[in-house]
Image: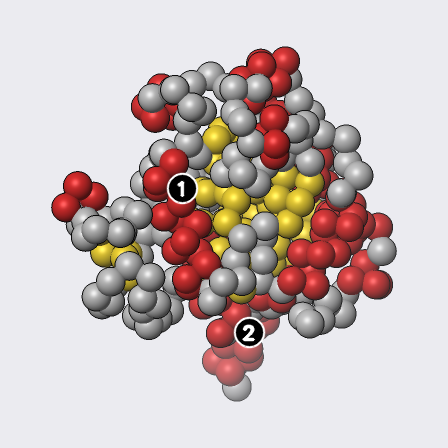
Amino acid sequence: MRLLSSLAAAALVGAISAPVAAEPVAPKVLVVSMFKHEASNWLKNEGLEQKIAIDGLSADFPDVSCNDKGLCLVTTSMGYANAASSMTALVLSDKLDLSKTYILIAGIAGVDPDNGTLGSAFWARYAVDGGLQWRIDDRKAPEGWTSGQFGMFSKAQGEKPGSHYGTEVYHLNEALARRAYELSEDVTLADSDEAKEYRAHYPQGAAKAAPTVGICDTVSTDQWWHGVALSKAMNDWAKLMTDGAADYCTTQQEDNATLTALARGAALGRIDMDRVAILRTASNFDQPYPGQAPQDSLNASSGGFGPSLTNAYRVGKAFSDAVLADWSAWEGGIAAK
């Protein structure tokens, strides 16, 4: 009897001293940035002082930063491998409940001068993987081809391949993209004298104009490609892979990788893909102006970097503020149409 009492007492003491698991944090909005400059305006202006260490995040950005309004930020580090790895760790962490969270991917990108200019902001409907293609030497491409790129396991350019990887195209919730655009279309956008001077070299009206907010689509690839022919090839690829629906305008390194990690989380019931939005702002053109060498354009100081960072924050904030200010209207989600 004395032994049983001692064991019971020990169990009671152990139960009292055992740490109680903290309730998972449930952000209303989670902003996803890719490097420190994209994160800086959010961190500086939104009071994201609560730090949640997540195992498996980038060693450079090991924490999720949150405030008491329900806004959080994660920084993945750049490129496919970092984006997929960081977002997988985030999605699987029991420290977070992301089941009702609006996930805002907000970063900078290159832009097609036929669609926009330096500093412009674009909400995406489609994210297309530009890297999942076969490529032969462009100089040896068959007559009539615009480049040496064509679909994997296809025989000719313009022949739509099957979905061999399952990550070639993500079609986001267009109703959410439209709502985000409506909330942000009148945001005052940053510009710079250097950007105004640089874009004047381009003949396209969209490139010459002041930055605006719009809706168009994005192509992901780790390779920083540049040039008129490559831009056309990526535009053609985006249209081919979406049966003509996508309107390519921005290019970046991470989005299809990020979306793949999120989709895996959705399959586990941890993420709602209808609550995912992509916002990309133009830091540079994806091709040179007439008479400029592509390598010079790629390395040019065009004046778009600063405005693109500011505008990713300003436009993204218009969306996040609306969600946070009226959570009862957003909690149930935005139905995809």
- Mark 1 is on which residue type? Ser
The amino acid pointed to by label 2 is Gly
For this rendering, which residue is in front, 125 or 66?
125
Tell me how many marks there are.
2
- Residue 235: x, y in percent? 44, 50
**Label ID, residue 273:** none
From this view, report whether residue 212 is shown above or below residue 155: above
Of residues 203 and 59, the one nearer the viewer is 203
The residue where tag 2 is placed is 269
Coloration of the structure image: secondary structure
The residue lying at 34 percent from left, 26 percent from top is 294
Q: Position of residue 96 (x, y in %)?
A: 58, 58
Chain-order first, disc 2 or disc 1: 1
At 27% from the left and 51% from the top, the residue drawn is 145
**Residue 21 as seen in the image, left or right of residue 261:** right
Badge 2: how crowded within 10 Å, few (<14), some, or many (20+)? few
Q: Nearer the viewer, residue 78 or 303?
A: 303
Which residue is depicted at the point 42% across and 63% down? 241
Residue 104 visible in the displayed image: no
Q: Is residue 89 left or right of residue 205?
A: left
Crowd around label 1: few <14 · some 14–19 · many ≥20 (10 Å): many
Can you see residue 121?
yes
Comparing labels 2 and 1, the label whose residue is closer to the camera = 1
Q: Is residue 154 left or right of residue 94?
A: left
Q: Secondary structure at mark 1?
A: helix
Q: Which residue is mark 1?
A: 231
Of all residues, the one furthest to the bottom in this rendering is 1
